[in-house]
Amino acid sequence: MLDREGPVPVYKQIAEELRRKIAEGELSPGDAIPSEAELEAEYNVARMTARRVARELRDQGLAYTIQGEGTFVGTPDTPRSELPVYQQIAKLLSEKIRSGEFPANRALPSEKALMAEHGVAKATVRQAIATLRKQGYVFTVPYRGTYATAREKWPKSKRSTPASRQNGL
């Protein structure tokens, strides 16, 4: 429980709670620290307070930040335990495109909607969309939105086809 009236700043209290989770193994090296948006929602604090939490953890040598990807437990040479958030979002969206949930030539949710759904910054959503664009799953029309591409423009699956299995490929 945060003491909002006490002498210890709120960001230091939140950082201490995260430090405890790290010490107890609840957050392991390479794990993502909750995003600014997640800290805002969980602790009912301002964005600046959430930013100060990450800075406090960095200053204590407990975490490092990669712009556009997040803050992670450990030092910059610590391998991450999961995909960066933008890659997780890109993977989820590509699965929805492949399943037909987002049909070809139909708009994906807006940046604002994706930010709210995933609790991330605009830069993270844009990085996810850029990844999908590079892979061929989406195209963007300025001032209109981002749309799913037709199946024939998708990246080729790494799975073998029946014909390639017959030919020993």
Image (cartoon, rainbow, N blue to C red):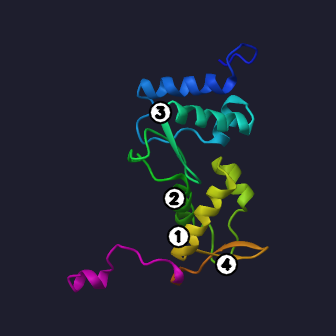
Q: Residue type at mark 4?
A: Asn
Which residue does the numbered mark 4 point to in the structure image? 105
- Label 2's element? helix
CA distance separating discs 1 and 4:
13 Å
Q: What distance separates the C-alpha of mark 1 from that of mark 2?
A: 16 Å
Amino acid carrying mark 3 in the image: Leu
Closer-to-camera residue (165/113): 113
Q: Quadrant of the N terminus?
A: top right
Q: Residues within 10 Å of mark 2 (few under 14, many from 20)?
A: some
Tell which circle, 1 or 2, labels the residue nearer the N-terminal end. 2
Give the image location of residue 15, x and y in percent: 58, 27
Kindly identify the amino acid type of the residue bearing the numbered disc 1: Arg
Disc number for residue 62: 3
Q: Earlier in the sequence, mark 4 or mark 3?
A: 3
| Residue 105 occupies quadrant | bottom right
Q: Position of residue 44 (x, y in %)?
A: 73, 30
Residue 41 visible from this viewpoint: no
Q: Which residue is mark 1?
A: 98
Q: Earlier in the sequence, mark 1 or mark 3?
A: 3
Q: Which residue is mark 2?
A: 87
Percent of width and height locating residue 158:
36, 73
Per the image, label 3 sits on a secondary structure element best described as loop
